[in-house]
Amino acid sequence: MAFIRRRRLERELYSKERFSLLLLNLEEYYFEQHTANHIINKDCKDERKFRGSLKICSKSIIFEPDDNVQPIIKIPLRDCSSIKAPEDNEANNPFTRNTPGGISVVCSQVFLIKERNVIAPYKTVRGRTEHLFQLDVAWKVGDVVQTLHQLYRASCLDKMGDQAAMKPVVQITLQNVRRIYKRRHGLMPLGLEVFCTENDLCSDIYLKFYSCQDRDEVYRLIAKYIENHIAEHTAESYVLQWQRGHISNYQYLLHLNNLADRSCNDLSQYPVFPWIIADYSSSVLDLTKPETFRDLSKPIGALNKERLDRLVKRYQEMPEPKFMYGSHYSSPGYVLFYLVRVAPEYMLCLQNGKFDHADRMFNSIAETWKNCLDGATDFKELIPEFYENDSSFLVNSLKLDLGKRQGGKMVEDVELPPWASGPDDFLQKCQEALESPYVSEHLHEWIDIIFGYKQKGSEAVAAHNVFHPLTYEGGVDLNSIMDPNEKVALLTQILEFGQTPKQLFTTPHPQRKIQKLKSLSRTSSHSTSIAESPVSPNEESFEDLTEESITLAWNNIAKLKLDTQCKIHKEAITGIAVTCNGSSVFTTSQDSTLKMFSRDSKTIQRSVSFSNMALSSCLILPGDTTVISSSWDNHIYFYSIAFGRQQDVLLGHDDAVSKICWRDGRLFSASWDSTVKVWHCVPGETLSNKKHHFELLAHLEHDVSVNTMDLNAANTILASGTKEGTISVWDVTTATVLHQLPHHSGTVFHAAFSPDSRHLLSTGEDCCFKVIDVQTGMLVSSVTTEEPQRCFKWDGNTILSGSQSGELLVWDLLGGKVTERIKGHTGAVMSMWMNEQCNSVITGGEDKQIMFWKLQY
């Protein structure tokens, strides 16, 4: 993780400097330094003088000797009884004689740090002591003493505003800024994280502002003037990539943490990762057994039923505000619990110069997991380092004295489970577990708890996922608290107790798509044996070959070339249907005609007019015997190809019929009368006058006009799009609505399920593509287009769309960008047909033409 890398870089760059901001207290600031001597036992036989640097901070005076053997001296300002520059007339004062530039400090307590340059707990020296610091530049003494007096008064009052009156200056050129993120700090929108050029001395900084307006203004100015600024992404931009396997579980969790304001530059909001493995006793880790894994549908505190029962009982008896857990799953203390071996100074800073008791240190993976299951107050999750490649946090390579346990054993390296041969092997197996099929299938359940809809409210209560109110954004308004002591106390509690991540999802998170067994067997030989694979290693089924040809076609979809074009209507073309053998193309148009076009002779063979109103769509029934057309005159017309005449008509709606579909003997019709109707259609005897028999099976009511619809592959789920931008997902078997989603701000032009039926893509006049997860109804991707896209075909990852201007556009949906522009019609592309192999396309345009496209590899 960047945290460990930065710590290592700091040690290399500043190996000669022992002072760091970690020696300061919470909300303390470092202002200036002066070259000086620290004089001990002035005018005595054992007088000693140590050269070094005097640091002026908002709550303390710190002297760093040049000699690394000598300890750093930290004098808290609150413990000072006198700070002065002795006057020349103080003849009896031993500090005045031959000491130009001297500052006398009398205090009741000092801390000695890094004696002999060893990182260890601070030594505390109590009792009245007097220190003389002699500045190299004598004329600065007055200013320094005046500053120290001001800071002394502020430190006693604990007024954060007074302490922050002066700030150090950090300069970063805009050309070095790579990206910036708005952050929360102390659960308030006050943070700004600035990432600079890689390998720069200052690779990143985290800034805290005192007003949201100031933070936002700085963000706006930086984003405006830097050329290579990477804009902030939304959670939905990553969901689809993760679902379809384009990013790993680890990468997805990092993205979610980033979007939820978790940063390795803020220990109070460090990235949170889940415990995955539950087996720390076996000699071999078996990732094929579900019992090897932790139940990801529950928070840590709910994994042990007996403990949970006690916590729930206490929760029920507790007065408001209620909470189930007295500690959080992520806090600075927990982060440093794991990282103490690589960041000991951070732990000393957090715990006032002390390490934790040896028995409470991070001694063993198994012990830590057991305590998280059984401990009365331990509910911590993991950090990203457990799923990365740097195992240094598990090894006491700095040879720190972390104490001795009750059994007499010194705290050294972390004890690993039997199935790990060493630290690197442990991390590798943790990575394999995180990316395993079991975790991929269940990770969305943990995301619901940490970042999703089970984070707050009644769903959090039902999931036993309720923490102290101060851990949630909005739990307290610090700006409304006037008492400075109370404000500091609350801020300290927020920063040190733990903070719940920003909520990213308010609906159930979709599950990840797991690849088919045969696909895994090709890419990972050790994952699936030949005996388990449904496909012979030397033989592929017809379905496999078809699937591979479709994949090949979509990989080359940008190579579509215009084969021929014909102007066959007098108005815009609204629908295209092609016979099974591909020889005849039927088209409908706003000119109210149905035309039959021969691909071989490139001539119109038939032209039929059912009424004087526009036709909106057409389809061919199985067997290529009948064409069905929908009309703005509220009717659906059946035309017999064999007999060349209208065969039947269905008056099915009270307004224009906008779209029709045919599946398994059922006709689906959408209309501007705000309904979608499902009909059972029994064909009549074609040689007699007997008409079709229509039986209404379902009536799907909408609030406004329905403009388009589509069915999933199993014909069980129907999606409809309205003129006001709403997408509705229906269970056809029960005629009930599953999701009603106002995703577009204007008419929905087209909607279609992905080939695997897991996602639904829609486009509208608001110039947006929207992808929803069919199971949960969650918006998982949104792509803005330059102009409206009227129709499209897609394979789940790539889109071929027809635009308002007439171009065919190829889209990388996951990247959210156009990868190819193909010149096409001179007006909007109104309709699109694609063959089963996805290598032949026909488009119909506002320019009254149909265009035939061929894929040329």
Image (spheres, helix red, strand yellow):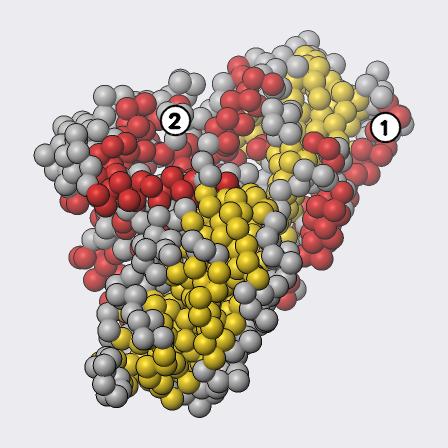
Q: Is residue 508 left or right of residue 819?
A: left
**Residue furthest out toward the left:** 531
- Occupied quadrant, residue 718: bottom left
Viewer-side residue, 499 vs 773: 773
| CA–CA distance in space, label 1 to label 2 | 50 Å
Which residue: 49% across, 18% down? 118
* Position in image of residue 24 (x %, y %): 60, 36
Q: Where is 699 relative to 758, above or below?
A: below
Is residue 304 left or right of 565 when viewed as pictured? left
Relative to 602, residue 639 above or below: below
Q: Residues within 10 Å of mark 1 (few under 14, many from 20)?
A: few
Percent coordinates x, y for residue 138 in the rendering: 86, 23
| Residue at image location 28% in from the left, 32% down from the top | 523
Residue at 17% of width from left, 31% of height from top?
A: 537
Where residue 113 appears, as percent x and y from the top left, is: 55, 25
For the view shown, which residue lies furthest in the top direction? 45
Q: What residue would you read off at disc 1?
A: 140
Q: How many marks?
A: 2
Q: Amino acid at mark 2?
A: Asn
State the image quarter where residue 720 is shown. bottom left
The residue where tag 2 is placed is 389
